[in-house]
Amino acid sequence: MTDFTRLPDLALRTYGGAVVAANDESFAEREALIRPGPPAFRAHTFGAKGQVYDGWETRRRREPGHDWAVVRLGLPGVIKGIVIDTAWFKGNYPPHASVEACAADGHPAPGELDGWVEIVPKSPLSGDTAHEFTVDDPRRFTHVRLNVFPDGGVARLRVHGEVVPDPEFLRDLTVDLAALENGALVTACSDEFYSSPNNVIAPGLARNQAEGWETARRRDGGNDWLVVALAGAGTVAVAELDTANLVFNAPGWASLKGIDAEKAALDDDAAWFPLLPKTRLQPDTRHRFRLDSDRRITHARLDIYPDGGLARLRLLGRLAE
C-alpha cells in the first residue's frame, strides 16, 4: 500500500460517486467499480450471463476499439493516485488500461463532458491484482474515465486524492467545517485498529459500525484521540458527536479542543483551548452541543475516553473572511 491510498477515495459510491456511462456492461454491471469494500467472489456461481463477478465486465470484443466507463467523483478534488483492481478476474482481465480525467461545472450529462486529459498512461495489467498508479497533476477534477484495452473485467476503481470543494457553496454560509466533502481531513489519530478515522467525517449517516471510526480496547489508562484539519479557518458554533450503531462500544466521554495553526504549532499543547469540556456520551445516540467559543480555529482535536467508536463528527460554523 502506497501513501496515496490513505487519502479518501473520491469516487466511492458512499461518498456520492456514480458510474454515469459505459460503452458495454454485458457480463457485469458498471456500478460495481465504485462499491465500498473489497470485491467478493463465489466460485461456480452462474447466472444467465455466466459466472457472477463483483466487478465490471464487458463482452469479448470482435471489432477494433476498446471499452470504457465514466465515473463522476462524489468528492471532486486533486487526484494523487489510482488503483485498478482486477481481483478475481484471472482469465478475463484487460491486458492494458489507462485513465483520463476532466473538470466540469454544474451537472453535465456524460455526452457533454470534454477537456479530457490523460492521468494514467496506457499500462499493462495482470489478473487478480490491485495495480497502483501515482498521479502528478495539480488540477481539480470532477470526472474520470477508465479505458480498458481491448475488453475484460475490472473489479474496483479507486481514485484517491485531496478534496477541493466549490467555494461558492462555503462562502458566507453555515457549513460543516469538519466535513470531508468540504475539504477537511483527519491528519493525526491515536488508533485506527478497526476502521479509518476519516470515516468519522464522511458524508451521510453511518449504516453500521464499519462506517464509523473504532479503536482497539485500551489497557494502559490513556485515551484515544484524533485531529481534524478543518475545511478552512473559521469559528464553530455547534458540535455533533454521533455514536449511532455503537451500542456496546461507544466512548464513555468525549471532549473537543481547537487551535489556530497559523498562530501556533500543533504540537504546542498550551496553544490548544477547550471547545467542549469532557462530557458524558450515550451509546447509539446523536449528541448535539452549542459551543460558546467565538475564537478562530484551523484544527480541532477530539478526545474520547477511554476508547471505543464514533460514527460521525460534525462541526457547524462559518469560514473566516
Image (spheres, grey):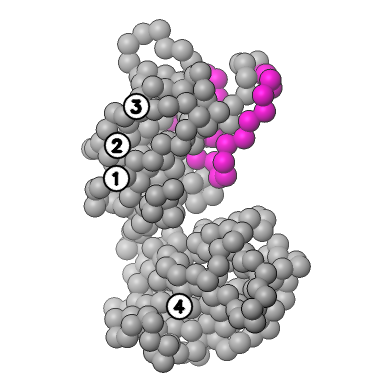
Count residues near mark 1 (Cα–Cα under 10 Å), then give few for <14, some for 14-19, many for 20+.
Answer: some
Nearer to us in this view, 283 or 225:
225
Q: Is residue 30 above or below residue 91?
A: below
Disc nearer the start of the sequence (2/1): 2
Placement of 43 over or under 225, stated as above or below: above
Q: Position of residue 23 (x, y in %)?
A: 42, 23
Q: Which residue is mark 1?
A: 135
Please give the range of residues in magenta: 21-47
Q: What residue appears at the point 65 percent right and 15 percent down from the top-left corner?
A: 48
Other residues around mark 3 within 10 Å, as few (<14) / some (14–19) / many (≥20): few
Frontmost of labels 4 and 1 is 1
Q: Secondary structure at mark 1?
A: loop
Q: Is residue 266 magenta?
A: no
Of tags 3 and 2, the one toward the viewer is 3
- Tell me which amino acid carries mark 3: Pro
Do the residues bearing badges 2 and 1 touch, measured as CB atoms within 8 Å? yes
Q: Are marks 4 and 2 in contact (CB under 8 Å)?
A: no
Near mark 4 (Cα within 10 A), the count class, few <14, some 14-19 or many ≥20, is many
On the image, the x and y values in percent for residue 137 come to 24, 48
Question: What is the magenta segment's predominant secondary structure?
Answer: loop
How far is mark 4 from mark 2, CA to CA?
36 Å
Q: Amino acid at mark 2?
A: Val
In the current view of this chain or complex, which residue is farthest to the right? 248
Point out the tag, 3 or 4, that comes first from the N-terminus: 3
Quadrant housing residue 265: bottom left
- On the image, numbered disc 2 is attached to which residue? 120
For residue 308, above or below residue 166: below
Q: Name the element at disc 2.
A: strand
- Specify whether residue 93 is in view: yes
Residue pictured at 67% horizontal, 69% vertical: 217
| Labels 1 & 3 near each other (Cβ < 8 A) | no
Q: Secondary structure at mark 3?
A: strand
